[in-house]
């Protein structure tokens, strides 16, 4: 069945001497594996349009639960700004890796959040902040969503004194047992990141000291509760 799907290439794998297999996150069908015959040939029209991060309309012979076959691609965006900057491309590469892991564990489609994240990074918004927002929004899909409305230990909604990744959320004054205290601004920002609509973000300015604390909280939370180890995340932490 020949169909058209809107998608973004997450990964590519060489297949034989001239072809490759790509994984595409699509709006209509979720993650789709696609065989791209001859796409490694220098003269192939599919060569550029099947690279990682390419966003377009993919015309495919669709086979559910099997490799589909690529016919053509109408490219919508190749993210020139992202590709021209080492920091931006590093974050975008990490997002691709994270998306691959999330879709393996969730039936909910995160295409729109992923696309909007790339758009915001392309537009010049802070890639660390956009990445952190996407990471937090992905937690419920991984089955480990944050409760940012009450103490993780007793359910108290008042007198919150800190947030701790190893315990999984907010801690109130009565349950406090010596965990590191974080600025109330950090808690406010984490809540905002968690609930904000990525598409609605037009500008967002956060002090570097808060960005580092928030990023560390998210990384520690992922380490404690998701079981994911993403190599590209470790790389970008070295450039922050």
Image (cartoon, helix red, strand yellow):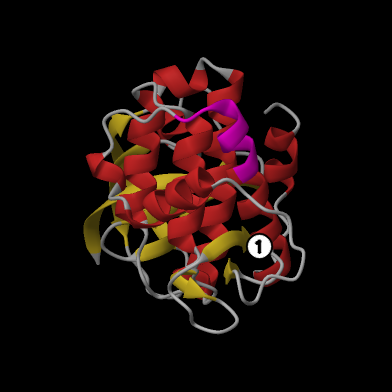
Q: Residue furthest top?
A: 84
- The residue positioned 26% from the left and 30% from the top of the image is 202
Where the C terminus falls, by quadrant? Answer: top right
Query: Where is residue 197 drawn, in percent x and y?
Result: 28, 50
- The residue positioned 41% from the left and 36% from the top of the image is 54
Instruction: Tell me if residue 8 comes above or below residue 206 in the rendering.
Output: below
Comparing 96 with 214, the one in front is 214
**The magenta stretch spans residue 210:** yes
Query: Where is residue 188 drawn, in percent x and y?
Result: 43, 50
Instruction: Tell me if residue 218 comes above or below residue 18 in the rendering.
Output: below
Residues shaded magenta: 206-213
Comparing 234 with 209, the one in front is 209
Query: In the rendered image, is residue 5 in sight?
Result: yes
Residue named by callout 1: 164
Query: Where is residue 2 drawn, in percent x and y?
Result: 23, 60
Where the N terminus falls, by quadrant? Answer: bottom left
Comparing 145 with 178, the one in front is 178
Q: Quadrant of residue 121?
A: top left
The secondary structure that dominates the magenta segment is helix
**The magenta stretch spans residue 145:** no
Comparing 4 with 121, the one in front is 121
Q: Quadrant of residue 210?
A: top right
Q: Residue furthest bottom?
A: 154
Query: In the rendered image, is residue 33 in sight?
Result: no
- The residue positioned 34% from the left and 55% from the top of the image is 111
Instruction: Tell me if residue 209 comes above or below residue 14 in the rendering.
Output: above
Query: Where is residue 12 drawn, in percent x and y?
Result: 57, 45
- SS state under label 1: strand
């Amino acid at each position: 069945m020949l169909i058209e799907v809107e998608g973004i290439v997450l990964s590519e794998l060489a297949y034989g001497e001239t072809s490759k297999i790509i994984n595409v996150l699509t709006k209509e069908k979720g993650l789709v594996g696609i065989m791209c015959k001859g796409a490694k040939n220098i003269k192939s029209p599919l060569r550029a349009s099947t690279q990682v991060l390419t966003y377009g309309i993919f015309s495919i012979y669709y086979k559910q639960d099997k490799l589909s076959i690529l016919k053509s691609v109408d490219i919508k965006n190749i993210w020139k700004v992202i590709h021209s900057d080492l920091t931006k491309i590093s974050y975008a590469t990490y997002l691709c890796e994270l998306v691959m892991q999330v879709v393996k564990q969730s039936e909910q489609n995160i295409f729109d959040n992923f696309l909007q994240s790339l758009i915001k990074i392309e537009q010049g918004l802070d890639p660390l902040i956009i990445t952190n927002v996407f990471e937090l929004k992905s937690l419920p899909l991984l089955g480990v969503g944050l409760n940012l409305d009450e103490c993780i230990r007793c359910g108290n909604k008042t007198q919150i004194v800190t947030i701790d990744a190893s315990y999984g959320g907010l801690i109130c004054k009565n349950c406090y047992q010596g965990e590191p205290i974080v600025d109330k601004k950090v808690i406010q920002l984490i809540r905002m990141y968690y609930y904000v609509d990525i598409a609605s973000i037009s500008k967002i300015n956060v002090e570097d000291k808060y960005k580092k604390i928030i990023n560390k909280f998210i990384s520690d939370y992922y380490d404690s509760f998701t079981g994911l180890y993403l190599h590209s995340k470790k790389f970008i932490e070295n450039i922050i």
